[in-house]
Image: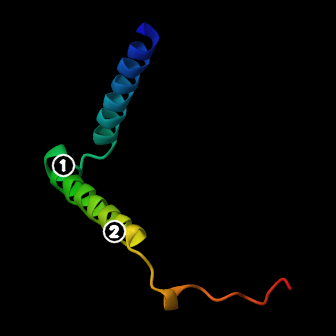
Amino acid sequence: MRGIVGYIVFFTCGLLAAGAYFYQLHPEHSIDEDLPRMRREVDDVVDRGKRLREAWDRPTKDNDKPTESTTGK
């Protein structure tokens, strides 16, 4: 159990260090401007995922079934 917690702590520290290094290398970016942009992108990905799930779960009509292809025969 301690090993898992240690991995999580070190992984989180690595992410924070990578973020700090990125913002040090790219002073034109700021965390205050990037967070709202990231939030919009996450919301967009979640909406796309919901639409994909709805399309996947929606039953198909009989005439929408793909026809048998003659390739490989």
Q: Position of residue 16 (x, y in %)?
A: 31, 30
Q: Position of residue 26 (x, y in %)?
A: 30, 46
Indicate which disc residue 35 carries.
1
- Report helix, strand or loop for mark 1: helix
Q: Which residue is mark 2?
A: 54
Is 36 located above or below residue 3 in the figure?
Answer: below
Most extreme residue toward the front, as rendered?
62
- Estimate the spatial distance between the alpha carbons at disc 1 and disc 2, rounded to whole Å: 29 Å
Q: Depth-wise, is mark 1 or mark 2 nearer the camera?
A: 2
Most extreme residue toward the top, as rendered?
2
- Disc 1 marks a residue whose amino acid type is Leu
Direction from residue 10 to residue 23 in the image, left or right: left
Picture quarter with the C terminus: bottom right
**Colour mapping used in the image:** rainbow
Observer-nearest of 42 and 23: 42
Q: Position of residue 1 (x, y in %)?
A: 43, 10
- Report helix, strand or loop for mark 2: helix
Kindly indicate the quadrant of the structure image that contains residue 11: top left
Q: What residue lies at 29% left-to-right and 38% top-to-bottom?
A: 24
Is 32 located above or below residue 40 in the figure?
Answer: above
Observer-nearest of 60 and 3: 60
Q: Residues within 10 Å of mark 2 (few under 14, many from 20)?
A: few
Q: What residue lies at 37% left-to-right and 34% top-to-bottom?
A: 18
Q: Position of residue 48 (x, y in %)?
A: 32, 66
Q: What residue lies at 35% left-to-right and 18% top-to-bottom?
A: 9
Is 11 located above or below residue 22 in the figure?
Answer: above
Indicate which disc residue 19 carries.
none
Q: How many marks?
A: 2
Kindly indicate the quadrant of the structure image that contains residue 57: bottom left
Q: What residue lies at 69% left-to-right and 87% top-to-bottom?
A: 68
- Disc 2 marks a residue whose amino acid type is Glu
